[in-house]
Image (cartoon, rainbow, N blue to C red):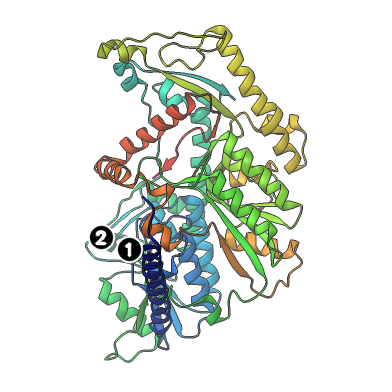
Amino acid sequence: MALSKSAKVAFGIIAGVLIVCLIGIIVIALLFESLSRPSVPQNSVLVLNVSGSLPDYVPDQPFERALGIQQEQSFTTLLTQLRKAKVDGRIGAVLLDINFPGIGWGKAQELRDAIADYKSGGKPVFAYLELGSNKEYYIATAADKIFVPPPGDLLINGFAAEAMFYKGSLDKLGVEADVIQIGPKYKNAPDQYTKTQMGDGQREVIDAILDEYYGRYTSAVAQARSKSVEDVKALIDNAPYTPTQAKSLGLIDDALYRNEVDDALKARLGYAAETELKTISGSRYREIPTDSVGLSNGEKVAVVFISGAINTGSSSSGLLNGDMVGSDTIVKAVNDAAKDDSIKAIVLRVDSPGGSALASDLMWKAIENAKTKKPVVVSMGDVAASGGYYVSCNANKIIAEPTTITGSIGLFMGKPVVKGLYDWLGVSNEYVMRGKNAGIFRETVKWTPEERAKMVEQANAIYYDSFVPKVAQGRNKTPEAINALAQGRVWTGTQAKENGLVDDFGGLEKAISVAKELAQLPADKDVRRVLYPVGTPWLESWFGGSQDQDAKAKKAQEQLLSQMPADVRRAFRYAAMLDRMKNGEAMALMPFELTVK
């Protein structure tokens, strides 16, 4: 039924009033944000919580921030606070409150480097940890002083890497994984579903990684605590320790409660005994703009975050699949940065174990196009392997931490065969087909020799005709040389540099400095960082859009999954991966999910 003219006018007036009100609310909120920015007294202590999941990047939401809605702290934000505090004359010291941060060893090294850079400005850093395992203590050793409360513990009792296998469970359910692996010794992601224990390739790689991590860990602790490496190894063999024991052994500086650490900071900063310590939290200090302390005020450099498992479509996040970086989202971000003439260089921050080979190639193409317009530099985080290396390989320069996990140049394909499960459930099915290979993705039948040969041909085409040649082109090597380094083999950053897969060591700051050099920007001037991808627009997040249609179902799913152990959630993620593969999608994914404790 058509609206009358008067109804249309009334509707237009109401819509106009709502729009004006919304604009007014936005203006008032942004004005309130600018007026309510915290003041920072002289000789303040910046208290940074090094805890939580610390995702590599969380898009900024200015309106939500203005309304006082707490935003998740990202790893990049944490590093930014240290950069600001170094040059902010009002900050006298930093206190790191370290509580099991959800970062890997690559980012732990990057954080230590950021702490060292802050200290180069002549300001002290204190570290406080109630319970300190290997990673927490590793970060803390970059500080000037380390404190643990008297009832705490120092759990630096060595490194252990865990690998889980689900074949036994699948056998009981009557499910079998039918897979093809390019690089069968090392590309062993499907081993979780086809084996019950480590193969030789996986054990070789994990041993090499543990050797690298353990060697760097003991050397760093030895240097920080003025001990020999042999002494540190002996201390690790006799751990854990109470704080009193740790102090007597020189592993920490004192066993103090949190308020007593404040007293130690007051003494270090020259406060009178009766004066209260002036502190500002990291969440409040985030509201201090970087340009207000003389940073981020030069030429523009884009930083594009490729953080999470790689998939086609738009980026998303959730408990089931974790952070998913979508090719549509990244291709748009790279294209936007490439087209913007005010942006002088692009830094890709890659923190991904890989995923869809198709999505990885779509990103690769966008990066290849961008490279014709301006320099492109890659900064690798904890992991940039398989598809994560695919999207990195054609950059002008690749920067990684020595403890970054990278390489894994290979892929696999497969499908779940659920005939046994159907039999157990009493389910039967039949296929009626036309075409010789019409049943190649049947879920109740393994591939016939002819079907397997066809799928091997497809996998070889992606690996030998696409992945390997593109890496060879990007790294100025022959395909034969890359194939010898590939085969799905995982490398640490140290090994990757020795093999020519990365160019230099460092984190995001190092990559930005290299990008400045390639773009011929002044080395002694900071740059304005333009971060991509941008967050979901405020109106869309409130009123919904195509990505929000399944929000209720997703929320219910995540509530259920949140009650499950982390290992069970990990199993569901790999099950979801198998489900995606059933339609023939090739996976360029790291061969195992490495957890080093």
Residue 101 at x, y = what percent?
Answer: 38, 56
Q: Could you tell me residue 18's position as x and y percent?
A: 37, 70
Query: What amino acid is found at the position of numbered circle 2 in the picture?
Result: Gly
- Up-down relation of residue 211 to residue 14 (above or below): above
Q: Which residue is mark 2?
A: 152
Q: Secondary structure at mark 1?
A: loop
The residue positioned farthest toward the left in the image shown: 151
- How many marks can you see? 2
Quadrant (top left, top right, bottom left, bottom right) of the C terminus: top left
Q: Position of residue 180 (x, y in %)?
A: 54, 20
Q: Is residue 53 left or right of residue 210?
A: left
Q: What is the secondary structure assignment of the residue under circle 2?
A: loop
For label 1, the residue is 129
In the picture shown, does residue 165 fall above or below 123? above
Q: Earlier in the sequence, mark 1 or mark 2?
A: 1
Report the mark closest to the observer, 1 or 2: 1
Residue 376 visible in the shown view: yes
Tell me if residue 48 can be seen: no
Nearer to us in this view, 32 or 396: 32
Q: Is residue 322 left or right of residue 152?
A: right
Query: Is 330 situated left or right of 368 in this image?
Result: left
Looking at the picture, tell me which residue is in the foreground, 336 or 478.
336
Give the number of the disc on residue 299. none
Compared with 12, 275 (above or below) is: below
Q: CA distance from mark 1 to mark 2?
A: 8 Å
Residue 347 in picture, x, y percent from top left: 63, 57
The picture quadrant where one finds residue 131 is bottom left
Mark 1 Cα shell of 10 Å, populated few (<14), some (14-19), many (≥20): many
**10 Å neighbourhood of mark 2: few (<14), some, or many (≥20)?**
some
Locate residue 571 relative to residue 225 in the image: left or right: left
Marks 1,2: beta carbons within 8 A:
yes
